[in-house]
Amino acid sequence: MKLSAATAFGGAARQPAEPEIEIGGLSKIFGQGAQAFRALTEISLTIRRGEFFTLLGPSGCGKTTLLRLIAGFEQPSAGTLRIGGREVGGSAPTSAP
């Protein structure tokens, strides 16, 4: 039997909310050739509407790069990024996600 946090603590079971942010196989490489630096490698995650989400990790692990990709400040090298069901990974830097 699988319990959710709500049912484990006596709350009513709820249907999962729709995905708000969906990331699939997201990678980011800075530079080219021998000087290339792979900041993210095939990151996949789903954040549902209403969820609390925390991004933790050591210095240099790619937290800021991932947040910059979600915000639209950087373009991914590979993978998909959807916000509210809309693909935003290839959007121009001037268009808000």
Image: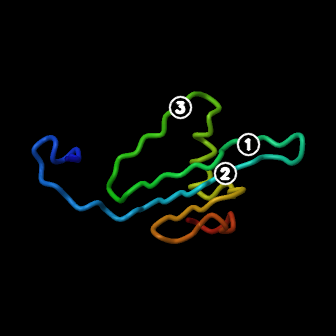
Identity, as a three-letter code, of the amino acid under mark 2? Ser
SS of the residue under disc 3: loop
Query: x and y percent of residue 10 in the render?
Result: 10, 44
Q: Amino acid at mark 1?
A: Arg
Q: Position of residue 5 (x, y in %)?
A: 22, 44
Given this view, does label 2 or label 3 mark the residue nearer the observer?
A: 2
Q: At 42% from the left edge and 54% from the top edge, which residue is drawn? A: 47
Residue 23 locus on image (x, y percent): 53, 57
- Residue lying at 59% horizontally and 67% vertically, measured from the top left: 88
Figure colour scheme: rainbow
Q: Which type of secondary structure does the marked residue at label 2 adopt?
A: strand
Are the residues tagged 1 and 2 within 8 Å (C-beta)?
Answer: yes
> Going 62% across and 50% down the picture, which residue do you hit?
42
Q: Nearer the viewer, residue 54 or 11?
A: 11
Residue 50 tag number: none
Task: Report the Cα–Cα distance between label 1 and label 2.
Answer: 8 Å
Q: Quadrant of residue 62?
A: top right
Q: Nearer the viewer, residue 61 or 43?
A: 43
Q: Earlier in the sequence, mark 1 or mark 3?
A: 1
Which residue carries the number 2 mark?
27
Q: Which residue is mark 1?
A: 38
Whichever of labels 2 and 3 marks the residue nearer the N terminus, that label is 2
Could you tell me the amino acid type at mark 3?
Gly
Image quadrant containing the C terminus: bottom right
Residue carrying label 3: 57
